[in-house]
Amino acid sequence: MAQKFTILLSGDLTVTDRLRSQIGDSRIIAADGGMAHAAALGVMPELWLGDFDSSDETLVARYADVPRLSHPVAKDTTDGELAIDEAIRLGATELLLAGGFGGQADHTFAHLMLLLRLKVQGVKVMLSSGHEEAWPLLDDSVEVDVPPASRLSILPVTDLEGITIQGVRWPLTDRDVVLGSTLTLSNEVETSPARVSVTAGKAIVLAYPV
């Protein structure tokens, strides 16, 4: 049976009706300082894990009744990745990573790369800050269900072969795009859902819902 989990990460988060709807009745795990988003979202995590180096005393006291899983500060993975792995251990087949943008650039980049790894593992996943969303594209296609006039970008992680973008102001058909190209940045959705597909290659699809 499909199980959706939302992972609360400690990056930027803008609470919107769209984000609340996406979270829905998913199970919630907070990663360290990501617990700070729980009140604004109106959710109560079933588990709070991490090294707790970014959780102040007020936050710890407020959520004292939430089960905690502590990890050492000196470890091989981030609190966010530990939370993701725990969700998968608990049966997650779909993940919403909320609060994965902003903060340190290295963490944001790592979260985007995690999208690709999770897709390889067969987990449906997206990353959101409320005003920015991301999905992995891996030798396949992605439908982007955002309102018309939303900005849409595809960020190549490898060379892309045969990329096609439909439902946008500047469509592409069967184009090859090299790593580092800005050709696929800052498009605009005209018909939702827009559709992005590649014959081969890896990329991150980014959207900015209006």
Image (spheres, helix red, strand yellow):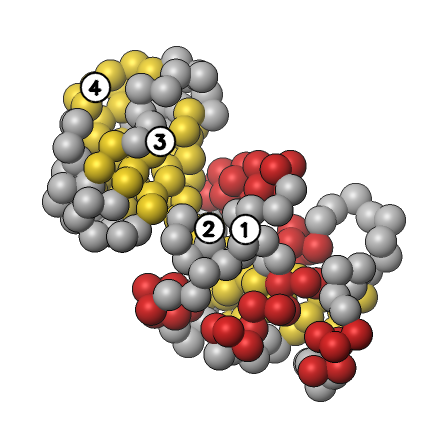
Determine which residue is flagged by label 4.
Answer: 174
> Where 130 falls versus 67 (above or below)?
above
Q: Gap between marks 4 and 3, in whole Å?
A: 14 Å
Q: Nearer the viewer, mark 2 or mark 4?
A: 2
Q: Amino acid at mark 2?
A: Leu
Q: Earlier in the sequence, mark 2 or mark 4?
A: 2
Identify the image quadrant of the N terminus: bottom left
Amino acid carrying mark 4 in the image: Asp
Splitting the image into 4 quarters, where does residue 50 fall? bottom right
**Which circle's residue, 4 or 3, is located before the other in the chain?**
3
Cβ–Cβ under 8 Å for marks 2 and 3: no
- Which kind of residue does numbered mark 1 sit on? Gly
Disc assigned to residue 100:
1
Q: Residues within 10 Å of mark 1 (few under 14, many from 20)?
A: many
Residue wearing tag 3: 154
Q: Earlier in the sequence, mark 1 or mark 4?
A: 1
150 left or right of 87 in image: left
Q: Which residue is mark 2?
A: 127
Horizontal side, residue 17 vs residue 30: left or right: left
Q: Is residue 94 visible?
A: no
Query: Is the C-beta separation of discs 1 and 2 under 8 Å?
Result: yes
